Amino acid sequence: MQKNIGMANDVNMEMLLVELKEFKDEKQRLIVTCEEMVRQYQEKIEFYKAQIDIKETSVKEQLFGMIEIDKMKTTKTEQNYRLPSGKLFIKKESQFMKLKSKYNEAEIPERFLKVEKSVKWGDFKKILKIDGDCVVNTQTGEIIESVEIETKQAGQLDIKFD
């Protein structure tokens, strides 16, 4: 009789797995549909952005041809012209400084250098052990307050479909 109970249990588990697989397949179909709609909307957005850029370029070219440069206000960095709907700018050529990606540290005073430290966790945890509810450095015996203990829950069932 025990064999029949086990078989019935197997049938019930198999039915649950089939139900889950069908559910996941249906939801995946919906996800793919949504992702396709997002892709189509992204294409439309890019198309509209391109139209905006084309219109903006056209209007700027027309405005540039209409501006009377000698009537523009001149500042150190630009020439500008105010209209009721906005302000037109023509930037002057200027120079600015930029730090090279590969710079010589010897040229820079120490007070302007920033050093960022980070823990080599993979190496550090090799010398640590959990002792009760403390973390201990096995080399020094020191309790390490900077490391906390977390517990992963055991016994979680996972499923892999064929």
Image (cartoon, rainbow, N blue to C red):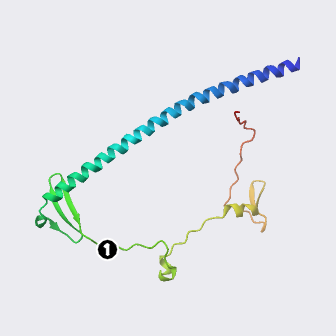
| Residue under numbered circle 1 | 95
Q: Name the spot of residue 82 as percent of width and height, x first.
A: 15, 58
Q: Please state which of residues 103 and 126 is positioned toward the viewer in this rendering.
A: 103
The quarter of the displayed image where residue 27 is located: top right
Task: Say which element carries label 1.
Answer: loop
Compared with 156, 90 (above or below) is: below
Q: Name the spot of residue 96 as percent of width and height, x first.
A: 34, 73
Compared with 144, 162 (above or below) is: above
Residue 144 visible in the shown view: no
Judge left or right: residue 5 versus residue 53: right
Task: Tell me the residue at 74%/57% (across/down).
Answer: 134
**Mark 1: few/some/many CA within 10 Å (<14, 14-19, 20+):** few
Compared with 127, 11 (above or below) is: above
Task: Tell me the residue at 37%/45% (across/down).
Answer: 46
Q: Name the spot of residue 13 as percent of width and height, x first.
A: 74, 25
Task: Tell me the residue at 70%/53% (across/down).
Answer: 149
